[in-house]
Amino acid sequence: MDISAIHFHDTRILSVVEDCVSGELTMEVDYPKDWERNEFEKRSLVFREVHSYQVFEGPFAGPCTILDAEVVAIEGRWSRLHLSTNAGRRELSCTGVELSKI
């Protein structure tokens, strides 16, 4: 899975919704549109065919911000993603991810 087209750094997580029927996990985020002007816009990160999702974060005031995203393993058809945040990390296994406008 290629995640290089998505600029995860400084993306603020606003909410996370799991769709048990489709197997998708959607993060509503404030996505950095223009770093120089500090402009953000609401977008969705949609993770396809999610196999697992775990949150390893401590208490934090305000929305968590993604600092880095990395594919750390490939397990069959799933890729394990590691999302580093300012509150810890989130890990999930999925078959794909896309960024879409809300």
Image (tube, grey):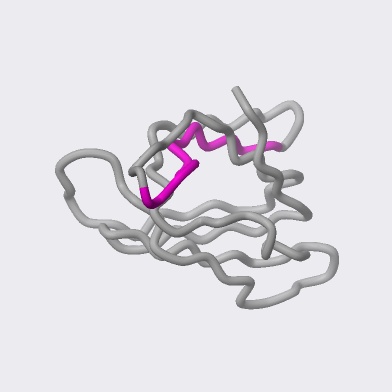
Whole-percent x, y for residue 35 in the image = 40, 51
Quadrant occupied by the N terminus: bottom right
Magenta stretch contains residue 28? yes
Magenta-tinted stretch = 24-36
Work out whether 19 lies above or below 66: above
Work out whether 73 lies above or below 77: below
Is 32 left or right of 48, judged from the image as shown? left
Outermost residue on the top side: it is 102
Rendered residue at 63%/71% (across/down): 71
Q: Quadrant of residue 55?
A: bottom left
All told, the count of numbered labels is 0
Rendered residue at 76%/45% (across/down): 49
Whole-percent x, y for residue 16 in the image = 47, 34
Whole-percent x, y for residue 94 in the image = 71, 54
Is 22 left or right of 10, judged from the image as shown? right
Is 93 left or right of 63, judged from the image as shown? right
Magenta: main secondary structure? strand
